[in-house]
Image (cartoon, rainbow, N blue to C red):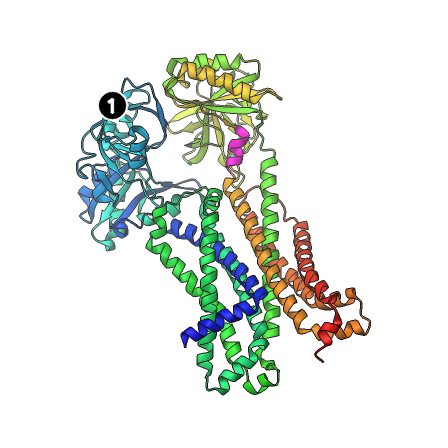
Amino acid sequence: MIKNYIKIAFRNFWRNKLTSFINLVGLSLGLAACILITMYVSHEKSYDSFHKDSKRIFTVVGKFKIGDDDIRMTRLSSIVASQLKENDPSVEDAFRYYEHNQSVSIKTSASSSEVFSENNLAAADANLFSFFSFDLIRGNPTDVLKTPFSVVLTNKAAEKYFAKADPIGKQLIIQQDSTYSFTITGVMKDFPTNSSIQSDMIVSMSSLSSMKETQPLLASERFQGGSFATYVKLNDLTKVTAVANTAVQLDKLSNEESTTTYALDLFTDTHAQTANTGRFDYLKVFPIVALLILILALTNYISLTTARAGTRAKEVGVRKISGANRRSLAIQFYIESGIFVSISFLLGIAISSIFKDRFLELLNIEIGNAFFYDRSFITALIGLFIFAVFVSGVYPAIVLSSLNPVKNFKNKLAKNTGSVSVRKVFTTFQFTIAVLLIVCGIVMSTQLEYMRTKDTGLQRSNVMMIPIETSIATNANTLRNKVENLSEVAQTTVAMNKMYGGYNIYFASKENSDENYSVSTFNVDEHFIETLGVSWYLEPEERTAFSENKKVIINQKTIDELGLKQDPRGEQMSFGSQFFEIAGVVKDFNYTSLEVPIKPLAFFVSSEASANKNMMGTFSTCLYVKFHDEVALSGLLDKIENIYSSLDETTPFTYQFMDDAFDTLYKAEERLSSIFYIFMVLALVIASLGLLGLITFASEQRVKEIGIRKVLGASISEIVVLLSTDFIKLVVLAIIIAVPLAWYFADSWLNYFAFRVDMPWWSFVIAGLIAISIALTTVSFQAIKAAIANPVNSLRSE
């Protein structure tokens, strides 16, 4: 019986080639989009769940409040892990992890001339491989990180530095301010891409106390914030709150006045809480859009299948008279749907495989091949397949199996099937979704263009930022002088941070006040404000005053937030335990993303000589180079790189243009917009395919009517209008329904931005015109074909 059902299914597919092709293309595209989204969402949701004890591992987080700001500390002092383990019996084990966020230079031997730059160095406690389920390929798991100056490499790093040779026992020379020799004690598998812990090389935690750069990190004996990610493994999951209370008590022992609270966050939730906000918002948007795309494709299949119910009426009648009951007929049509969905699913997998790399590139993420064998991903795919089979088969099975055999033989379909009304609803739904996506895509592009071109209060163009590592040491001044003397260069300045690359935060208060506020701070030299074109609101009374010690420059927002005088020059502000006199006030400018409002800001300004001496070469700083208009950039970059390389042979020359750094803030939105456009086009293609199938079917059903009308003198244009009007009405109705929905969703997205465009009314006009144009093109193509057909052929059988 099943074999017979399958044979009939393929005969029907072949008999209705155009309908089958439309269904196959639409459903395959829809499933491909869903498979890609399922892959991404499953990967993001599966972070850290591969660890054997993932449900027992927690991240220790500190929380406190400064003014109206809630501060969350994900990095704690070095003693927190051991203190919790010693003082709470529910803590089975504790672990510390330190990310060294500065670039280091690496050689495979002291005599080697080849120098590598490494940005992915970390330190971990000796129990790394017992605490987590990472795989060690070479070495003893309990000993590899036990002794100072031991290091474990990932397989990728081992091949990078030693090719196919065995690295165990060999040395790595790591240099930052000082030079250290590490012994390779182990090689591990590369970290899975869905691990929140990522590093190419991990040194033993005990090494940090012997390294000049990291010794201060271990100096604190207080239970407080610090530099170490701290994890605990509990032996009793009911004691989560109790362990958090233990942390609070230990903190109070260090500082009775502390108001810090602590929480234990499940380790598998860490990625969701620390991931880039824009990227993680994809998890909310993409599944909804992918589901809509799939439903569009499924409604095409359902609509066209039920539309052709009349062509199978006699088949159903014969089967019923021969004894087939409604259940067996429903099973037959379900099997047909299952076969069709299976073929479409396989094609969807093939299409998604072709576009997978491009999709991941747009999202700026990497998914390892091992993940595709992950249980969560396979389960999600099976769920997607079952959903598609169920939805595609349930309505056709009900409609086709319910046909009346008596009326079937009279060539009359039961009026109560409601198939015509359902098809109208499906068509309206499809174009509603298409218009909704078009409007949202236009609004996203408008907002992105606004952010790129908005005057942020800084002159971002023609400014290059060059990271200066401490490896350049005393040559830093020479570098700056030589670069500044280039004819293409207008001016240079120095700051501790790259603009749009981060900043420090101090807790500040005004004079004679105990209320603290979080204030962003930049350490800069005296040319910074002029070089970047920051405008003065209240200029220092003496131009040299603001570079004197214990002087600070603030922005207008600081006046408002702290309740300072409108002219606060001469007032004192405390930053931590130090007091500074306000020397001047700059106008507010955007130093972070336009998603957030401008916040209080302070500049600690040094003279050029002081900055050259105390900042450059002593700390990792940034040299800003402002160059003239219409400069040959390739030539300028070559000159600067030659100067840099001659003064620092160990650190590769890197740079970033400030306008590129600003644009980087909106990469998440740009990616979202790009993928949204893909979905928009996909929705339009699927909706158009469905419309093409329905107008083709309508033309076939009315072929004799069209012939009679032509014989009676109807023109081609009149027949085209006759066939097109009903469908265009549905598209217009879809536009009317989509407008308020699109307004709501687009406006909600815009509300995420502190600086946003007004809702562009013209986006609805453009979306409507696009939808109507595509519908007219699709409908007219088939309507004209039907209208120009020879009426003799259609009437010959009468």
Please state, as top left, top right, bottom left or bottom right, where the N terminus lies in the image: bottom left
Q: Return the residue nearer the eye: 667 or 502.
A: 667
Q: Which residue is mark 1?
A: 181
Residue under the point 57% across and 53% down = 680
Left or right placement of residue 382 versus residue 230 in this view: right
Q: Which residues are magenta?
A: 658-665
Would residue 84 be seen by someone viewing this image from the given angle? no
Above-or-below relation of 428 to 275: below
**In the figure, residue 717 lies in which quadrant?**
bottom right
Left or right placement of residue 792 versus residue 701 in this view: right
**In the figure, residue 404 lies in which quadrant?**
bottom right
Above-or-below relation of 404 to 131: below
Amino acid type of the residue tagged 1 in the rendering:
Ser
Give residue 315's position: percent from left, percent from top: 53, 80
Extreme-right residue of the structure: 713
Residue under the point 46% across and 16% down = 642
**In the figure, residue 155 lies in which quadrant?**
top left
Instruction: Label 1: state its secondary structure.
Output: strand
Would residue 578 be seen by someone viewing this image from the given angle? yes
Give residue 424's position: percent from left, percent from top: 62, 69
Residue under the point 33% across and 22% down = 176
Residue 436 painted magenta: no
Above-or-below relation of 596 to 219: below
Q: Return the residue nearer the eye: 638 or 336.
A: 336
Give residue 107's position: percent from left, percent from top: 30, 23
Decide: few, some or many residues near mark 1? Use Cα within 10 Å; few <14, some 14-19, many ≥20: some
Please state, as top left, top right, bottom left or bottom right, where the C terminus lies in the image: bottom right
Give residue 512's position: percent from left, percent from top: 43, 30
Q: Return the residue nearer the eye: 95 or 354.
A: 354
The secondary structure that dominates the magenta segment is helix
